[in-house]
Amino acid sequence: MKEQESFLKEKIDFKSPNRNIVPITTSIGRDGKLFVGGCSIEELVKKYDSPLYILDEKTLRSSCRAYKLALEKYYPGKSLPIYASKANSSIFMSNLVSSEGLGLDAVSEGELLTALKGGVQNEKIVFHGNNKSDKEIEFAVRNNINVIVDNDYDLERLDELSNRFSRDLEIMIRFTPGIECHTHEYIRTGSFDSKFGFGIEYLNTLFAKISNTKHLKLKGIHAHIGSQIFELEPHKDLGEIMANVILEAKKFGHEIKKLNVGGGLGIKYTENDDPPSIDEWVKTIATSVVKACRKHNLDLPKLMCEPGRSIVSTAGITIYKIGAFKEIPGIRTYLSVDGGMSDNPRPITYQSNYSACLVSNPFNTNSKNKYTIAGKHCESGDVLFKEIELADCKTGDLICVFGTGAYNYSMSSNYNRIPRPAALLVSDGEAEIIQKRESPLDLLKYDVLPDRFIKQN
């Protein structure tokens, strides 16, 4: 497990944070302890308690700017990076990406409201989802938010709404391009067998259907081929596939003006991960689209992409406090922390791996102890690390887990009635709360005891 001793010593890639394990402002203080954003982690826990989510503002902004700059550099037409808010949805994140000129994609009314409350412009929001409710679709239409049509059910209701409102609606459609990527089967979304989008073989029938509607105007197409992707080759194929779809749409009178290639760029969770840079990923996508459009004599559409994890994940860390130790001689030593699967469900759900260190001994100096880091929940599978080397540690010491900015808070729960942690933003030595810590009493707010039970007691 030498990687746990060395990863903090790696050179930081400031231009492409997804290639780092740690936030770009990570440093070691004079006391030899961990700092992020100019803030002492120990001092933050003393003030805000643990578990604690922390986001580094400079890493977030660096990631947003990397996408913007790469699109401007490699794509001669109009472009717009769109933050996939499912990775980490909050008013703060909506406000930050908007301030950097990004759009946002949402998959529920809650995410749409969060985006609007955070100041994202309506025309820069796209609404995804394979089973949108009537209420959600009407909310999007009334707020002039771009709806991406995922299936015939979406299409039928949008047609009805446009007729009821007697107004034209611009729509985009999502289709499955059939490109396979080497990723976890639960997060592979671009294959032929997917719950998302229309099958590519069905598109001509779909184009004809849209042509027969009165108010629906097909202006864009969308395809997404997976998540946590380290390969560039599949994206080289995507441009030609999408250009051919544009050509087929033209036969039915549809002028495609927007092309959304999804997201999916991976990040470096551990030493073994080697994702492409943001610049390399955008260059591959942009070059593929430009080449295909020129080959088929097509005007360049507005190019959109939807990064989520690669914007927010590396910016985030989670801090835990060590509690109990349990040694099973000859087998393992369990080290239990004050959080677990309720604040990070990815290890138990996807068998995901992370990197971590002691806050008081970041380089794990003289590391020789192997631990299984267990969460506090009543599940034997609530294990954050099956095996990790750490220096000598004791009850009360702090552990920092890196790469937790994406899908930790957004997938968190109150399992075992455990409140969600607070989240902080750190920058230039200052820390600010962006999400308050829940209390046990907060979890009772929506419980209701029926009147007849009250009378019986």
Image (tube, rainbow, N blue to C red):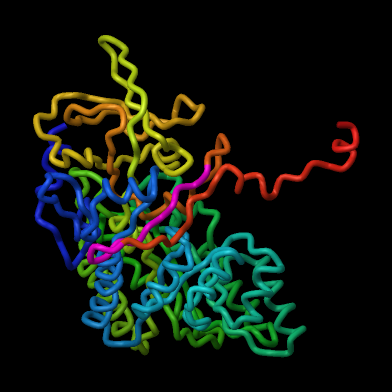
On the image, the x and y values in percent for residue 239 come to 34, 72
x and y, in percent, of residue 152 in the image: 65, 67
Q: Is residue 243 visible?
A: no
Query: How many numbered callouts?
Result: 0
Q: Does residue 234 lie above or below 445 as drawn? A: below
Q: Give yes or no for residue 424 being in the magenta stretch.
A: yes
For residue 9, above or below residue 397: below
Residue at 17% across, 37% down: 4
Q: Quadrant of the C terminus?
A: top right
Which is more toward the observer, 392 or 18? 392
Quarter holding the N terminus is: top left
The residue drawn where x is 79% and y is 41% is 449
Position in image of residue 242 (x %, y %): 40, 73
Position of 428 compared to 454: left or right? left
Taking the spot 22% from the left edge, 52% from the top edge, the residue there is: 22
Is residue 217 something one can see in this rendering? yes
Whether the magenta-drawn stretch holds residue 314 is answered as no
Q: Nearer the viewer, residue 307 or 339?
A: 339
* Residue projecting furthest to the top: 329
Who's the residue at 45% across and 44% down the image? 343
Please say if 85 is above or below 333. below
Magenta residues span 419-430
Image-quadrant location for residue 143: bottom right
Residue 135 in picture, x, y percent from top left: 70, 68
